[in-house]
Amino acid sequence: MSQKGDQYSLSIIEANWKSLLIVVPLAVLIVYTYSLVWGWGKTSSDLLVMYRHYGFALLLLVTGTFLHELLHGVTWMKMGGLDWDDIKYGFKLRVVTPYAHCKKPIAADAYRWGILSPGILLGMLPFTVSLLLGNAWLFIFGFIFTLAAGGDFLMFWIIRDIPADRFVEDHPERVGCRVVTQN
């Protein structure tokens, strides 16, 4: 049972390392699944598309990263009843990490949806569509942004036992949150 003040956070570096336990098997699963549907030849060819068109791939990466953080914030706003000013966006240069920070406490279920939304919308959804269409760019985008959500999936797992109606406060410096009393 979560109590007021309970911490559910990791340093950015610790979260990045621990998320590898999720990301590596997930990468294997994604590539294996795509190859089951489209074959190994197409899978390897599709993965190489980003190297042949590195400029476009870089544009997708930058745009997707921006959208990833934006989705965290917008979901917290919509699900938590917050305003635009209640979300802070930034970039931690020391650890080369963009971030979205929710400045006000919100219900744990709203926080969880905010954590998961980029991985679902930018990762799993495009990957699923790529399985149906065999589109290389959807495959690559879905692959990259499912893996980019590895830390988000880790944090979701860490806070899974917090009751949905408990309020949590996004940690200002670390990845994660702490349980607080309702506003």
Image (cartoon, grey):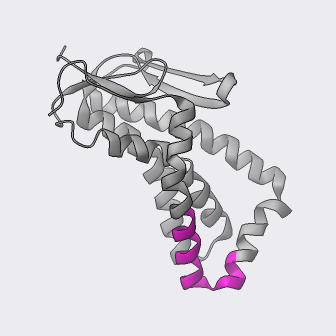
Q: Nearer the viewer, residue 14 or 48?
A: 14
What residue is at 33 percent from the left and 41 percent from the top? 158
- Residue 132 visible: yes
Examine the residues drawn in magenta and state their main secondary structure: helix
Q: What x and y, as percent, mark residue 43?
A: 67, 77
Q: Nearer the viewer, residue 79 or 160?
A: 160
User: Would residue 32 be counted in the magenta stretch?
Assistant: yes
Q: Nearer the viewer, residue 126 or 35?
A: 35
Left or right: 150, with 135 as reference point: left
Q: Which span is picked out in magenta?
A: 27-43
Image quadrant where one finds the N terminus: top left
- Residue 149 visible: no
User: Would residue 137 be counted in the magenta stretch?
Assistant: no
Q: What x and y, as percent, mark residue 49?
A: 77, 66
Q: Quadrant of residue 164?
A: top left
Q: What x and y, as percent, mark residue 183?
A: 19, 13
What residue is at 28 percent from the left and 28 percent from the top? 80
Q: Nearer the viewer, residue 86 or 169?
A: 169
Q: What x and y, as percent, mark residue 163?
A: 16, 36
What residue is at 56 percent from the left and 59 percent from the top? 24
